[in-house]
Image: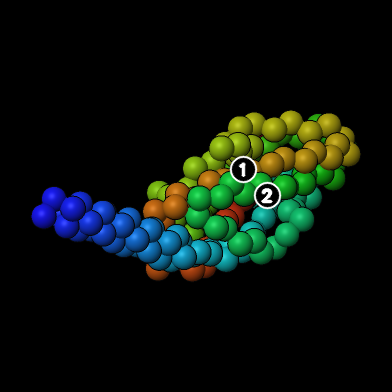
Amino acid sequence: MLKDKKIIFILSFLAIVIIVSVLFLLNKTNNNQRISAKLITSVHKDLPLEFKTDKNLIILKPGEVKTINYYVRNLSEKKITGMATFQVYPPELKDYMTKMNCFCYEEQTFKVGEKEKYALVLLVDPNVTKNIKEAIIQFIFFKK
């Protein structure tokens, strides 16, 4: 009788382990969500800068850190100062994004002809709303 109870306990335990493992794997495969993000850069008309990124489209995978490089060049014959603003569409995606490194909202001063490289480092929360498949990340440089 005691031997039968041990066997039932062991089989029950194994069944629970198998069920939990399968559920975990199913959850992992459902987390293969990808968000296609279009990158847009622009500069205010009164600011003579060239502002671009090396990619127009990126894939964001929730839970992974993504680095996006941006390049700025002063096209004027004088030192100028500007600041980049950051926008994300759809707006609800912003609640799931962490900017680990960003040059946005900080004054940047560029000498004549100076070129600079900046990095935006993002982390999208793995719990991001499942219906977000496409996004826009937009930077606009303004004169400061």
Identify the element where label 2 is drawn. strand
Name the residue rendered at 16%, 57% in the picture. Answer: 4
In the rendered image, residue 79, in percent from the top left (x then y), is placed at 81, 32
Residue matched to label 1: 121
Residue matched to label 2: 68
Q: Report whether 2 appears left or right of 25.
A: left
Instruction: Please report whichever mark, 2 or 1, sits nearer to the chain's N-terminal start.
Output: 2
Q: Report whether 97 appears left or right of 118.
A: left
The correct choice, above or below, for 108 with respect to 121 in the image is above
- Local crowd size for mark 2, using a 10 Å CA cut-off: few (<14), some (14–19), many (≥20): some
Identified by mark 1, the residue type is Val
Identified by mark 2, the residue type is Ile
| Of residues 48 and 8, the one drawn nearer to the viewer in this rendering | 8
Q: Are marks 2 and 1 in contact (CB under 8 Å)?
A: yes
Q: How did the renderer colour the structure? A: rainbow
Identify the element where label 1 is drawn. strand
Residue 15: numbered disc: none
- Residue 142 can be seen in this image: no
| Measured Cα–Cα span from mark 2 to mark 1 | 6 Å
Name the residue rendered at 61%, 43% in the picture. Answer: 121
The correct choice, above or below, for 76 with respect to 135 in the image is above
- Local crowd size for mark 1, using a 10 Å CA cut-off: few (<14), some (14–19), many (≥20): some
Name the residue rendered at 61%, 62% in the picture. Answer: 59
Name the residue rendered at 66%, 64% in the picture. Answer: 57
Q: Quadrant of residue 5?
A: bottom left
